[in-house]
Image (cartoon, rainbow, N blue to C red):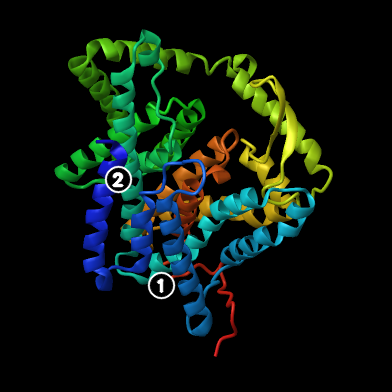
Amino acid sequence: MTVELILLAIAGAALLAVGLLWWRVPPLLIVLFAFAFVTRFKEGFQPEEIVFAGLYYGYIGYWFTSRLLDPTRQIVRTKSDLAILLFLIFAPSTFAISYLSGADVKQWLSEWVIVSMFFVYFPAREHCETHPNGVRNIVLSLGWIAGLTLVRNLWSFVSELQSATAIWQVATARVPYNEHLLMFAGLGSIVWFSSARTTTTKIAAFIASGLFSFGVLIGQSRAVWVSYALGTLFIILMRTGRARRRIVTGITMTVAVIVVAGLAIAPGTMRLLAVGLTSRVTSLENAVTNDLSLINRFHENSAVIARIRENPIVGHGMGTQYRYFSLVYESTYYTSFIHSWYVGFVFHFGLFGFVLFFPVYVHAIVRGSRNFLSSDVPRRVRLAGLVAASALVAEMLGAMTESTFGSSDKPLFVALLFALAFTQVPGKRSHHHSPTRLLPAP
């Protein structure tokens, strides 16, 4: 029995339970619950992705329509909300530019589906602010998606080790799927561990952080490793006293547990994995000059920047291809995918789209940090703010070599992190954020 069949069985049983409780469960949580089963990237449109698309866009359409028809409920409350909404309106409006640039319609649609995951920000932010357990629900949803991803990746990793027929296959075994989700969950687990009050909670958080960290490790993405380290360092700097010491102790214990458990269960395999991981880590020092894949991405960026100069204001639209000589394939390569999120963002959406979106990204980091440092907000909101800020800081670094808009999972997670960062306690909204209505007040 394959892992896909097992996950399908879990999904069927879980969806049945959700169906029985439909009237008690917020639709947003059902959408996020279902997303966990479509995180694995596969070529083309898969049946489960089509089902999820109907669920997601149906819910988003319902949410926006219901708010537009009710003047007492707001879609846009802050300038950041307005900027995000304008970007989401601007992005599909570039279709004409894409068409004139010769973009493939299917590729345009695929990229728009990825960007449109950001619509979930609006209902998620409202849920955080209006539902009694809103912040907890969003955090648990993030954990659920990342947890199921971790189970799938661990299964794949074990299967790869079992099917290995050569030593080098063991040493280089990796599962490079959805590592960013595991990184976000790992940082959240670290925050949870640093703030846990009971022994049971500390143990649960420690186990979670260890498992997610291992999931990041077996992805063998050096960019994600460095990003994860940066996010962890951000948390350590934001925490003080006992919480900071607990994190450092926890990191040391996690490494020790992974090594001891590995040597106890499969000493030979563990030694080979250690050799492979050590080689990967030590290669960081000379990656910029010796790693052909990384050098090729710089070459890619140069070709894209040359195209950006042709239309820097509004960009070339989604799905538009560019060409460059690939050092990896040793031939001229045509693609619309760009590894650097920043370069790719300007190429597709121009400086106009960049100015709309990225100041909001930075503001989310600042806002999440302020919530954490504030003594005037509930504890859950404070901790959620630190989770969001640390994860967004980590993603800023990782996005330099792996686009956040490269797959649908990262935009959805970033949107949810935005919602956590921008959560404002009713009655204590910052004077820096004057509400802006999409429709006039009655």
Residue at point 58%, 14% (across, down): 286
Label 2, residues with CA under 10 Å away: few <14, some 14-19, many ≥20: many
Along the polypeptide, which appears first: circle 2 or circle 1? 2
Q: Nearer the viewer, residue 410 or 31?
A: 31
| Vertical comparison of 149 with 315: above or below | above
Q: Is residue 370 visible?
A: no
- Residues under labels 2 and 1: Cα distance? 24 Å
Q: Which residue is mark 1?
A: 426
Three-letter code, disc 2: Trp
Task: Describe residue 150's horizontal placement relative to residue 297 as left or right.
Answer: left
Q: Is residue 431 visible?
A: yes
Percent position of residue 12, x then y = 26, 54
Percent position of residue 151, x then y = 29, 38
Residue at point 62%, 18% (across, down): 292
Q: Nearer the viewer, residue 160 or 382?
A: 160
| Vertical comparison of 214 with 320: above or below | above
Residue extending furthest toward the right: 310
Residue extending furthest toward the bottom: 442
Which quadrant of the view contains residue 26?
bottom left
Three-letter code, disc 1: Pro
Q: Which residue is mark 2?
A: 192
Q: Residue 373's mark?
A: none
